[in-house]
Amino acid sequence: MTKIAIAVLDANGLDAQISPHFGRCPYFALVEVDGQEVRAVETITNPYYPSHEPGQVPGFIHSLGAQVMLAGGMGGRALGFFQQYGIEPATGAAGTVRAALSRYLGGDLQSAAPCTESVKHGHG
């Protein structure tokens, strides 16, 4: 079983819309997968929305037991925190949770780079 946390804008399960930036999302979809099969989907409120200190959100995701973090984008410091926790970050997710999971499980959503917006406002 793998737990995948996904930054989302709403609480619509597999149909939730991906957040463009993980730290400023109101919710996380926490999805348990076994191979290619979704076993469970839970929506978790982001306790650090709308503002957070560096490291708080990665620590929270770690406390949920997630091994993977999918988001539209995140800053370089967040990428480093996730890697320190042993959580695989992947950026470039878009659309719905269902679409992002499909891309991730298919091997098309595997890498992470700091988003340009985060670099501009000092999170790079």
Image (tube, rainbow, N blue to C red):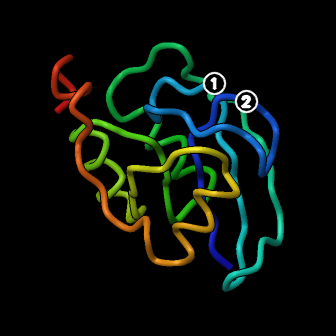
Q: Earlier in the sequence, mark 2 or mark 1?
A: 2
Q: CB of mark 2 within 8 Å of CB of mark 1? A: yes
Q: Residues within 10 Å of mark 2 (few under 14, many from 20)?
A: some
Front one among 91 and 48: 91
In which quadrant of the rendered image does the N terminus lie?
bottom right
Amino acid under label 1? Pro
Q: Mark 2: which secondary structure?
A: loop
Q: Which residue is mark 1?
A: 26
**Toward which corner of the image does residue 65 lie, by quadrant?**
bottom right
- 57 relative to 68, above or below: above
In which quadrant of the rendered image does the C terminus lie?
top left
Question: Position of 93 compared to 43: left or right?
Answer: left
Amino acid under label 2? Asp
Q: CA distance from mark 2 to mark 1?
A: 7 Å
Q: Position of residue 76 (x, y in %)?
A: 21, 41
- 124 relative to 76, above or below: above
**Looking at the image, which residue is at 49% across and 53% down?**
70
Q: Position of residue 17 (x, y in %)?
A: 66, 37
Q: Which residue is mark 2?
A: 10
Q: Position of residue 52 (x, y in %)?
A: 43, 20
